[in-house]
Image (tube, rainbow, N blue to C red):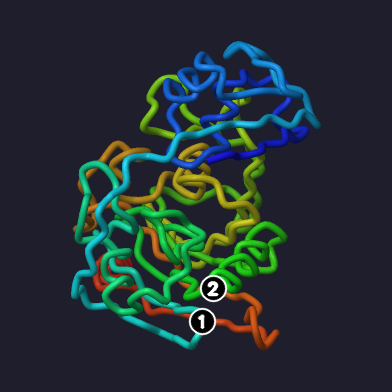
Amino acid sequence: MTTYLTAEAEDAGARLDAFLADSLEDMSRSRAQQLIEEGLVTLEGAAVKKNRRVSPGERYRAEVPEPEALELTPEDIPLDIVYEDADLIVLNKPKGLVVHPAPGHPSGTLVNALLWHCGDTLSGIGGVSRPGIVHRLDMDTSGLMLCAKNDRAHRLLSAQLSDRSLSREYEAILRGTPREAEGTVDAPIGRSPRDWKKMAVTAQGSRRAVTRYRVLEAYPGYSYVRCALETGRTHQIRVHMAYIGHPVAGDPLYGGGKPELGLTSQCLHARSIRFIHPSTGEVMSFDSELPEEFTRALAILRGR
């Protein structure tokens, strides 16, 4: 698969291997280095070195071999569908449901459920393992997701993600309360230099990330907040809230995994989504109820 990547201003000075790992979904830094060493990454037709520092405006060509095809099997997994028509599906993803098959999760995913529900009408733009997936949620993040049922809808909805006409708001319980009742975290996110499984606020191989937040309720030791994404980086809210000293409660990766409030994982819910319908041009807006674990945690805090 041939992919073209253009370095932006925020990429200036990043190592090429880190730039590739951050730009290409599910690309590890070691895999990016391997592609470069095999001559599969070029700039203006010439091979490049993995430690090259990228400059804004440079356009790289990457030949990424197709991964070994996963055998995707439709599975009769219940879906909580909020809205559906010929172009798209809006659904509530429960906590614990993986979005697409990957090593360690070959089945039992949202994609398997969508294949059962939609058959062969699902958009193929997301690739062989991600048909219909316009955007993702972490396994243990619940809430609204938007999926495309044909390639045209997928292209138009993905474009809205890029130009921010598709907006998403999340709600979370944080440890502690931010000093300001409303604020914006504008801090670049890239792969953590210390742990490849984590993302981090870092200047190396990162991209601009912006999260707006508002405190809805404050309690001793915790706060209930709403967050709006201006960008869509991996783990963005979890990383940004931990960066300002108020990790999402129950977060095992960025909050230390501290047992609290009866939570089994991060208390983060995709509460609302707003977009323009790809066929009708109508502005569509949806909200979802907080899941039971979230409301139980709030009840504990409100009862203190």
Please tell me how crowded label 1 is: few (under 14), some (14-19), or many (20+) other residues with Cα within 10 Å. Answer: some
In-front residue for pair 40/281: 40
Query: In percent of the image, x 48 and y 88: which residue is there?
Result: 85
- Across and down, in percent, residue 209 comes to 62, 44
Tell me which amino acid carries mark 2: Ile
Residue 273, labelled with which disc? 2
Secondary structure under badge 2? strand
CA–CA distance between discs 1 and 2?
5 Å
Q: Which numbered circle lies on residue 286?
A: 1
Q: Residue 205 is drawn in which quadrant?
A: top right
The amino acid pointed to by label 1 is Phe
Q: Helix or strand or loop: what does disc 1 sit on?
A: strand
Q: Nearer the viewer, residue 89 or 295?
A: 89
Badge 2 density bin: few <14, some 14–19, many ≥20, Cα 10 Å: many
Q: Along the horizontal axis of the image, is 119 left or right of 61?
A: left
**Which mark sits nearer the N-terminus, 1 or 2?**
2
**As drawn, 233 above or below 132:** above
- In the rendered image, residue 194, in percent from the top left (x then y), is placed at 41, 20
Q: Position of residue 252 (x, y in %)?
A: 28, 42
Q: Quadrant of the C terminus?
A: bottom left
